[in-house]
Image: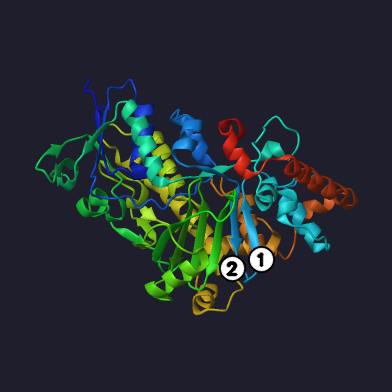
Amino acid sequence: MIDRAIKSIAIVGGGTAGWMAASLLAQTLRGTGCAITLIESPDIGIVGVGEATIPPILDFLKLIEADLDAFLQATQATFKLGIKFQDWSRVGESYWHPFGSFGVSIDRRPFHHVWHKARAEGLDMAVADFSLAAALGEAGRFAPPDPRASGPLAGLRHALHFDAALVAKFLRDHAERRGVRRLEREVARAVLRDDGFIDALTLTDGGQVKADFYIDCSGFRGLLIEQALETGYEDWTKWLPCDRAIAAPTAHAGPPAPYTLAAAQDAGWRWKIPLRHRVGNGYVYASQAIDDETALSELLAAIGEPLAEPRKLRFTTGRRKAFWNRNCVALGLASGFLEPLESTSIHLVCSGLYKLLDHFPDRDFAPSNIAAYNQALIAEYETFRDFIVLHYCATARDDTPFWRHRAQAPVPASLAERMELYRACGRINTRPGELFTDLSWFYVLEGMGLRPRAHDPLVDASDFRQVRAILPRLAQQVAAVVAQSPTHQAALDAGRSVAA
C-alpha cells in the first residue's frame, strides 16, 4: 500500500500566526516523522496589532503545553475580563461585553430573558450588577475563576493582553525546542506544478524549499494563497468601511485596567490595550471620512505623547474566497481581515488551525475535505463579520457624517434576520459551536440600545415576586466577590497562581 501521509510542511511567514501554526503542528504531529519548516525573513516585520485576545487563547496555550507563568512574564501580559465600549450608541454612554456568566438561569430560562421582563417592569439594573467580569473591570480588580465555587466565581472567564512581537518570539523558541526548523530567508515566489499545486518555494538567495503541504502566514500580501494561487478576495467594505489604522504605544498614566477599551471616534474607533510595560493604542478609521493627518491628530489628542513613531496600516476588510486552495492553507492576515473590535484576529488563527486538524489531509488532498474546511471557516468569518457590523448599524449617533452613514447603511441579510428576531422576542438563535453565544449578542444588542418588543413568554411562568427577591441577592454576591478581590496590578504581581 502506498504511503500517502504528509511528510513535510512549509510555513511561509513568522509572526503570531506562523509560530502558532508551527507550535500546534509540532505538538500534534510529534512521532509521525513529519518535518516542519518555517521560513521568515528578518527584513519583513510583523503587523502585530493583535495584542488583545479572548478566553480560548488559554486553551491554545494549554494545548501546546506552554508554561503559562513563563508566557505571562515573557510577553508582558496582563489579564483581560472583557471589552468596554465607550460612545458607541451615544456620546457619553458605555456598555460592556464581559467574559463569563451573567446572573443565573431561573426556572430553566436564561438570565437575559429574565432581564428583559425585569426591565420591562421598570427595574433599574446594570449589566455589571450581575456580571462578575464587568464588575471587576469597573473596579480595576481581578479574581481567578474557580469552577468549584458556588457563586459567580464559578462562571468567570478571562483572556490576556500581550505584546504580539514578544508572543511570536516565545512561540518561536517553543516550536524550535519541539523540532521545527527555522529558515531565515525570504521567499521570492512559488513554483507551481502543471495541476496548479505548489511544487516548491524559490528563495531570494536562489535556494528552494519543497514540501507536501504549505501554510501561508505571509500577511496581507498572501504570497502563496493569492500571488501564486490567485484564490480571490471577497471585499466587505460596503458593510465595514474602515480601511486604515494608526497604532502608537504610550506610557502608563495609572494602574493597568483589566479590560480592553474600544472608544468610538469621529470616523471610527480607538483601542486602548494595557500591557505591563506600556499601553497599546490605535485608531481604526475610514479614509473616506477622515484624512490620515486629521486621524493622527485625533488619536494623539486622546492618548498623549507616544513612546515611538506611530505606525500606519492599510487594509481591506474581507476574506479570501477560499482559505484552503489545493495544497495551501492561509492563516492570519493572509486569510482575510476583520477590524480587531472584538479581539478575534488571533482566535481566527486558532480556529483555522483546529479545523485544519479536523480536516488534516493526506497527499491526495481530497476536494471534498478541502470544501468542508472552507465551508466551516467561511461560516465563522461571516458570523464574526455580522457581529462587528452590529456595533455600527445599531448606533443612535448622528453627530458626524461617518456615524450617520453607518446608521443608515445596509447590513448583511444574515444580520438583519438576527436583529429582527431579537426585536420581536428577545431571542438570538445562535448555532451550536459558534464562538459568540446568545449572551455575547445580548450584551451588544442591549448595550447599543435595541429593546425587544416582547419577552420570552415562558418567563411569565415564574413567580416574579420571588424573582424580584432573587435579583438583589445575585447582585450582592457579585459585589462581595469584587470587594474581596485584589487589584489587577496585585494579581499580575502574584503571577500564575492567580490566573490558573
- Count of numbered circles on the image: 2
User: Which residue is labeled 1 in the image?
Assistant: 450
Nearer to the camera, 398 or 232: 398
Residue 28 sits in which quadrant?
Answer: top left
Q: Are marks 1 and 2 in contact (CB under 8 Å)?
A: yes
- Residue 10 appears at what percent x and percent y? 24, 37
Sequence-wise, the earlier of marks 1 and 2 is 2
> What amino acid is at disc 2?
Ala
Nearer to the camera, 198 or 473: 473
Residue 166 sits in which quadrant?
Answer: top left
Is the residue 382 above or below the residue 208 in the image?
A: below
Residue furthest out toward the left: 206
**Residue 462: in sight, yes or no?**
no
Nearer to the camera, 251 or 104: 251
User: Which residue is labeled 2 in the image?
Assistant: 394
- Residue 4 appears at what percent x and percent y? 24, 27
- Residue 182 appears at what percent x and percent y? 25, 34
- Residue 66 appears at what percent x and percent y? 45, 30
> What amino acid is at disc 1?
Leu
* C-alpha gap between disc 1 and disc 2: 7 Å
Left or right of residue 225, residue 163 in this image = right
Structural crowding at the residue carrying mark 2, measured as other residues with C-alpha within 10 Å and reported as few (<14), some (14–19) or many (≥20): many
Residue 316 sits in which quadrant?
Answer: bottom left
Is the residue 431 above or below the residue 125 in the image?
A: above
Is label 1 in a helix, a strand or a loop? loop
The residue positioned 36% from the left and 54% from the top of the image is: 336
